[in-house]
Image: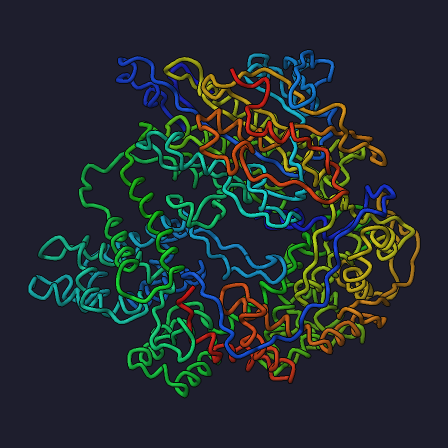
Amino acid sequence: MQSRVLFPPLLLASLLLGCVGNLAGDDSTPGPTPPGPSTSTFACKAGLTPAAVPLRRLSRLQYLNTLGDLLKYALPDEAAAVMTGLDPVLAAIPVDEKQGPAKHFGGFTRLAQAVSQEQVEGSYAVANSVGAALTSTPARLAKVAGACATDADTSNDVACLDAFITSFGERALHRAITPADLAFYKKPVTGSPVAAADWADVIGLLLAAPEFLYFVESGKDAVPGVKDFYTMSAYELASRLSYHFWQTMPDEELLTHARSGDLSEDAVFEAQVKRMFADPRTRATITSFYDEWLHRDDVAELTSRLGTPAFDTLRGSFTPGVDLRQRMFGELVDMATYYSLDSKGTIDDLYTSRKSFAKAADLAQIYGVPVWDGKGEPPTFVEPEREGLLTRAGMVATGSVNTRPVMKGVFIRRALLCDDLPPPPANANAKPLEPTGDLTARQEIAALTETGICAGCHATVINALGYSTENFDALGRFRTSEMLIDGMTGVLKGMKPVDTAATPHVKSGDERVAKDSRDVSKWMLESGKAQACFARVYFRFTFGRAESVTRDACALADLDAELEKGTDLGAVLSRVALSPAFRQRNFGE
Amino acid sequence: MQISRRMLLRGLGGFALALPFLPSLDSREAKAGPPASPRRFIALRTEHGGILGNNLYPDSATLTQSMPYAGYDVRRGDLKVAVSGTRAGLSPALTADKSRFTQPLADKMNLMRGLDMPFYIGHHRGGSLGNYKDSDQAMIAGMMPHPTCDQVLAWSPKFYDNLSTILMRTMVVGNGKLSWGWSNPMDPANSTVEDVQATDSSLALFNKIYSPPPDPGMKRPAIADLVLEDYKRLRNGDRRLSSEDRNRLDDHISRLDELQRKLSVSASCGNVTPPTKDSTSLYSDTFFREPEKHKEYWQLMNDVIVAGLVCDTSRIVTVHAGAADWFSDYVGDWHHEIAHESHKPDPQKVLLASKQGFFEWVFLDLMEKLDAVPEAGGGTLLDSCMMFWTEESGPYTHDPISLPVLTAGGAGGWMKTGSYIDYGNQAVIGHDGNGDPASEVTHIGLLYNQFLGTTMQAMGLAPADYEQTPGTGYGPFYEETATWFAGYGKYTDKVKKAAGEVLPFLKA
């Protein structure tokens, strides 16, 4: 859908190209206040407790996955066909948009928690449709509920229903079924014999239940000394683990431990965390974490300017395809996933890796390396300057003729360092960087944003981060000099050496000049801010809510400390489940 | 959509609707005398602004009347359609084929300038309907989310005094946010404010506003009541839940109540041939460079919107045309190259074409379709509407000074129409035009809250039904504290005090 491409620039506009236009020489008007130093450490103190959070609903993805797994449980042979048949009603379930403190920078779809009328009506329609589908023929119903559901013997109908509700309901509601539940969920039954329509309504009722759509938690034991805090029950732990790592309902092994209650025991719980993290289903979750975090919403289609003189001059013989942009983002995710799951990589690897994870020829061509097969040792970049996350095509490409140092800088500052930036002032009339034919992108940006009120942010905390990768062009290709292209005619009017040296102020007060992004990456790690930010965004993703750097400090500090000491990413990503925050809940406030 | 002799509404994509089944033409009602038409609210919003005054408004010489108001003179004149060749219009942007844009239609419009938000908001979405928090750059400390005015109407028993036919309290259309409502509309005090999902699919919209005739063989009751009971069972049971959990369940329960209400609606427009073509089927990688497809897209959507209003399954529509480059074939970075350069001649030309296209193929198209439907009590469906189109910004993109508003319909006789109105204070300059490529000057005007409040009154609500603070119109009142804002310190007490009143020249 085209709008995916076109809307983000609207949202980001003035931050991204910054602060030019009608300054009218009025340097006396105050600009926004540049950010102060953000904390790279979290103060975990005794007595700090996470805030109570409202009942969370399943994300759309979790809802669909759960539905799919329930169908596989109930009707293994025909689950896929039933799911396909549900497409029209599933389409009415609203799509979750990224949410977060700054949704384009470290926002995640898991944080979308609004429950709209469409959601309620959509899930109700799905529940009814599944009920109808699973009972559409006697043969199907017999597979779903057993022969007792369709045989001529009516004396076994109640037992048949009870058995079905107990087993199917346990999976749908994520807890053991009680006698009161059995009585309630049989309410649609109108008489004897139990008709297919009765069965359909029983199924529909279970799939419209609050515990199917929400993570309903009541806790188990009070946490000593902490008011209103309770440990999670074994079933609740099973759900937390399963929905965090697999985005779906617990599997049979987890359910067995939930049923027995031994999942509440540390050893069993830790063993399950280990097992689940090693399971292939975790890969999809970790992939989605990196995909949502590292996706730059500001990058236009790389084909949008094909055929325009200036862009054609820039691209030369290279023709970007419609999938290239997504491949660039995919490479970022593949890199991060590789170090998280396929090798014992650390956060340092994310920022220093010189391996290419380009799986397609066009991206590999940009990097000048062979295509990676996705299995073996990834090829190594040719240029020493291409090092780490910041230098990959997905981080530097723009979809236009010029690079966009401001956009790059804002993304690094906000998504990778978790610093806040104030909005630009009203007269910051964002202006496009049109190639002038005589200035480099950096020179143009500097002239437009580093004087007057704009300088407060641009000259101190935004631009320099973007300048550090000016040795890569708008298609992500390495360069030592920049083409000076006339924006109107496309005529190449000259070349100028790129300048990547700048003072990035990774930490407030650090006046060192970085020679290029390699220094920036190094200083991001040295400062601890890269690790702290990683901890924050992963916490956000895990718990489906915005973190509080004060009240969630203990869980954040734990993740941060492990990242700082070089624990491998896989261990860090699984470790979050071992934190008290994951295994307890605040029922107060 | 054309009205044939057989009184059939025909739209694109195979959609057809037989007029004799319209509730407002129902013979039973005719015997009892003409029913009062319900009022309808339609809000359309486009991105950016940036259109220059001389491209959007008629010549200021047409403002022949003035009256003192809020400490200065506000002005009005008659809207006069000028015909040139095959085209007819009020201004370069508000132009269409002369066979379509006629003086009688213009007589049902109002064109307003000089409506301001007195604070910097930058890019926003819900701000157009009163949720100023739904903005990227709102810099006002303490700004809080606020429901948009359409959602206040949607849950107002004064507006919907009879819900027996209503399947969608609001048709929320387009791509991107615009409407914001309460998480629990039945309990606003304990609600959060959440965006209301929009649809860009005309077919999905049709499926929501059209209720097929009931299956006579279907006697089994729906399970909705049991689902509701299940939620209450949990909400009121003895399981440990936090108060936040219970609030959340209350939100869901209120949605289930609404679902139950809708399940009891048996409205039908009779012989409806559902559309077979969907607006989203037109999407492609090049969609936003193909104005002809944009026409088709909006015609498909307008057909369904009109059907919803005709069948009285909804009375509120919000439309957010969320991409900037509708009705343009421009290739490139529209946002930066056109919107943010809009005062330069070439980008303004591109922008003008885009706005003109939206006027002709969305606004006017919808107007025509509404005006083609007669109401039993006299007049047309359009006459019962308060329909308006506004933009994200005024002539300076990012800046909410002099927001343009074009209205259509008389809100069931509540509103006078046919006016070009300038609420700007000619003595108080907002932007002085210095350094601007077009030397565009703006004047400080009345508050946008006053316009929104006026629309609420046009829909039958009293200020007490919607004002957060008495006398402030619709929406929270904020005032910019940053001196660089072009309106800083320029809104007088008289202007602020007027915000709760009906705008001059509008009340019939």
Q: Residue at x 61, y 81 (%)?
A: A561
**Can you see residue B87?**
no
Where the C terminus of chain A falls, by quadrant? Answer: bottom left
Where residue A40 appears, x then y in whole percent?
Answer: 67, 73
Where residue B363 appears, x then y in whole percent?
Answer: 57, 27
> In front here: A97 or A198?
A97
Q: Residue at x 62, y 43 (%)?
A: B124
> In front here: A575 or A378?
A575
Question: Given the current orientation, which residue lies at the most extreme bottom position?
Answer: A267
Res. B219 image quadrant: top left
> In front here: A39 or B224?
A39
**Can you see residue B6?**
yes
Res. A368 image quadrant: bottom right
Q: How many marks?
A: 0
Where residue A236 appears, x then y in whole percent?
Answer: 36, 72
Where residue B251 appears, x then y in whole percent?
Answer: 38, 51
> In front here: B349 or B142?
B142
Asked if B329 appears above or below B251 in the picture, the reply is above
User: Colour scheme used in the picture?
Assistant: rainbow
In the displayed structure, does residue A187 sit left or right of residue A333?
left
Q: Residue at x 42, y 36 (%)?
A: B154
